[in-house]
């Protein structure tokens, strides 16, 4: 686990810039406080900052092959490195280290760019082939680890974080207006875009080979929903799921440093704790975030699982004061990022880092096994949209608007309003309709006229439909899960997991996202995932003997924070300062009158604008501390 960076000059006679590489690495020192390494070979420079996890003493990077004609810098973990190493040794390869990184360079010798197909892990790496004078970049199948790049007519730059790329004066600072529009639509920036027009992200499951100033990209993995033509009894799927999970956990327990589990109180993180216990026969350390507000607090349920397995359990609470640190954390994203869960994500890593260097987390179960309520809402929406429009607008929308605003996460007002709101966009956005922050008309009011004129005609949901087209033969439920797996998970959930854990110099692993487990999940019939009002049917059945009844039967709340409540109380002054008319006007992007109206409606309990307000707060903090700062530094 580390941060990687590099430069490839397209003129083979020009040497890579060592001073630039040093600056790029310094900007990511938090990702790798244990070690630093660089390689300068003519027009290429490779660098890494290392968080030492496997072969702590001997795994220094870059790592080279036997004749030193190939070199790799690597971020992540290869979980099947032991098996790959043994096979490569049998083939005659000589290893200098015991690190998982070294299998990549030897496997490349055997298979070239197709080496990625043999890797089980989370990874982003750059491999320089001096003999072929080409640079290969690669990213894992789901996008657990990041890899961003900038290219112009003279060079390629790549790095694990935007901030690293921004240390190069040649990188333009022009905003991508479409990315801004996407951010206020989805709460984050989806797809390959970044907030800067010049910076893009290598998509998950892709390689990019640069040679002679030209790039060739290839998708090396595509999930297919190949459901059994003759479905098996559900218990057979349950047993297969348990075995896949235990296998994935067994591989991901490989570590030379202390390890624990983030325990949220839900099914997925609980299943990881159970699998660790059943794999090792030993109790592990577990860590939980709690809140004073009972409707958001999952710590009692986490405690039930911890007690069942006798873990060494640690709890701590998030307070409104922690949210005021958002400005300090947003720089790790390098672009606007809305979900307030970033704060608790960083807090749990910072808290647990005193005891463990590696944590396992439960990300991925909802996307694979139908866990989100939006999948149920999607089915209801198809019926809702068959109703005459006058009935929808004349009754349902008015009924939703008249419900009193409550502070309950699972209140009737929240569920009804969000259903009606999303159902009206379902035909355009599918499952993503319920994850929108500002709808089209709302963004028209929020964004200034001058900024909107810089936007081409567009539909933010176009990316959703492109993803659905990749699984065109899939069911509606499968399409919804695939979009979440391909967009919401890598661009939102996993981005947060990576940036906030790395900000605390900690590695987080996600065993449910083992690609073999993902491929198994794609064979499970829809009826075993979500049916009626039930979600994650298979998982609840499979874990009957693994988790306490109070956890199995708990309603899903998700990894969230009582920010809407705090915005009317402890955070009110902070938010009004950040969103002052003067500050908002300086951006030239947001309309002060619209921002003020949203604040007033939320303060007066006329509406719950929690997500919209925090989207604006995070944008303002990024704009002030990162964007304006980058321009000031450039002069």
Image (tube, rainbow, N blue to C red):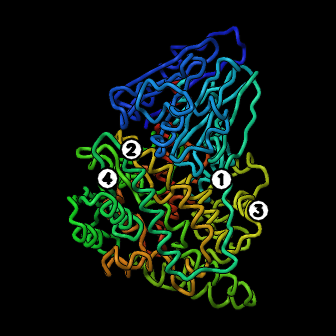
Residue contact between numbered discs 1 and 4, judged by CB atoms under 8 Å: no
Q: CA distance from mark 2 to mark 1?
A: 32 Å
Mark 2 neighbour class, 10 Å CA radius: few under 14, some 14 to 19, many 20 or more:
many
The residue that label 1 is drawn on is 181
Pinpoint residue 230: horizontal percent, then vertical percent. Answer: 67, 80
Distance between mark 3 and mark 1 Cα atoms: 23 Å
Instruction: Using the rendered image of the protein, determine whether residue 261 is visible from the camera's viewpoint.
Output: yes
Seen from this angle, which residue lies furthest right?
Answer: 457
Residue 58, percent across and down?
Answer: 37, 26
Mark 2 vs mark 3: which is more N-terminal? Answer: 3
Q: Which mark is residue 469?
A: 3
In-image side of 258 versus 398 (left or right): left
Q: Which residue is mark 2?
A: 507
Residue 57 higher or lower than 608, as above or below: above
Q: Earlier in the sequence, mark 1 or mark 4?
A: 1
C-alpha span from label 2 to label 4 = 12 Å
Which mark's residue is nearer the viewer, 1 or 4?
4
């Amino acid at each position: 686990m580390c941060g990687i960076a590099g430069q490839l000059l397209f003129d083979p006679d020009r040497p890579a810039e060592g001073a630039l590489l040093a600056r790029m690495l310094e900007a990511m020192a938090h990702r790798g406080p244990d070690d630093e390494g660089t390689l300068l070979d003519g027009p290429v420079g490779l660098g890494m900052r290392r968080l030492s996890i496997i072969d702590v003493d001997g795994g220094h990077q870059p790592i080279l092959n036997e004749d030193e004609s190939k070199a790799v810098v690597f971020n992540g973990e290869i979980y099947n490195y032991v098996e790959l190493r043994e096979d490569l040794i049998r083939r005659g390869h000589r290893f200098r280290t015991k690190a998982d990184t070294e299998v990549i360079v030897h496997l490349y010798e055997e298979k070239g760019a197709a080496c990625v197909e043999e890797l089980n892990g989370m990874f982003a790496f750059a491999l320089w082939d001096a003999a072929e004078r080409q640079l290969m970049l690669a990213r894992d199948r789901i996008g657990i680890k990041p890899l961003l790049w900038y290219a112009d007519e003279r060079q390629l730059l790549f790095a694990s974080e935007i901030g690293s790329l921004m240390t190069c004066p040649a990188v333009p600072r022009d905003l991508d207006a479409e990315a801004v529009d996407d951010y206020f639509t989805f709460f984050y920036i989806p797809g390959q875009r970044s907030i800067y027009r010049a910076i893009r992200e290598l998509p998950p499951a892709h390689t990019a080979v640069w040679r002679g100033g030209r790039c060739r990209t290839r998708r090396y993995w595509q999930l297919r929903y190949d459901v059994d033509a003759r479905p098996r009894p559900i218990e057979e799927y349950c047993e297969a799921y348990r075995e896949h999970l235990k296998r994935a956990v067994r591989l991901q327990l490989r570590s030379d440093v202390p390890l624990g589990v983030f325990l949220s109180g839900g099914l997925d993180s609980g299943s990881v704790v159970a699998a660790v216990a059943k794999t090792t026969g030993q109790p592990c350390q577990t860590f939980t975030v709690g809140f004073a507000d009972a409707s958001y607090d999952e710590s009692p349920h986490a405690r039930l699982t911890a007690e069942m397995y006798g873990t060494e359990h640690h709890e701590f609470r998030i307070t409104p004061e922690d949210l005021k640190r958002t400005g300090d954390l947003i720089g790790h994203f390098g672009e606007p990022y809305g979900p307030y869960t970033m704060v608790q994500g960083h807090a749990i890593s910072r808290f647990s880092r005193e005891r463990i260097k590696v944590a396992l987390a439960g990300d991925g179960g909802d996307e694979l096994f139908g866990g989100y309520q939006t999948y149920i809402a999607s089915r209801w929406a198809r019926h809702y949209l068959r109703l005459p429009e006058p009935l929808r607008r004349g009754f349902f929308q008015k009924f939703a608007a008249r419900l009193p605003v409550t502070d309950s996460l699972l209140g009737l007002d929240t569920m009804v309003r969000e259903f009606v709101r999303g159902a009206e966009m379902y035909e355009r956005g599918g499952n993503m309709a319920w994850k929108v922050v500002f709808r089209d008309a709302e963004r028209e009011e929020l964004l200034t006229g001058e900024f909107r004129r810089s936007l081409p005609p567009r539909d933010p949901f176009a990316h959703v439909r492109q993803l659905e087209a990749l699984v065109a033969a899939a069911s509606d439920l499968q399409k919804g899960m695939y979009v979440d797996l391909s967009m919401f998970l890598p661009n939102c959930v996993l981005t947060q997991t990576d940036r906030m854990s790395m900000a605390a110099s900690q590695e987080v692993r996600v065993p449910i996202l083992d690609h073999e487990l993902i491929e198994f999940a794609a064979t499970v019939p829809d009826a075993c995932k979500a049916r009626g009002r039930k979600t994650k049917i298979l998982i609840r059945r499979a874990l009957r003997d693994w988790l306490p009844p109070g956890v199995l039967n708990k309603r899903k709340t998700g990894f969230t924070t009582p920010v809407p409540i705090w915005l009317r109380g402890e955070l009110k002054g902070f938010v009004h300062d950040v969103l002052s008319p003067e500050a908002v006007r300086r951006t030239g992007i947001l309309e002060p009158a619209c921002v003020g109206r949203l604040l007033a409606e939320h303060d007066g309990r006329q509406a719950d604008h929690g997500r919209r307000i925090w989207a604006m707060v995070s944008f303002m903090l990024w704009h002030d501390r990162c964007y304006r700062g980058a321009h000031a530094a450039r002069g």
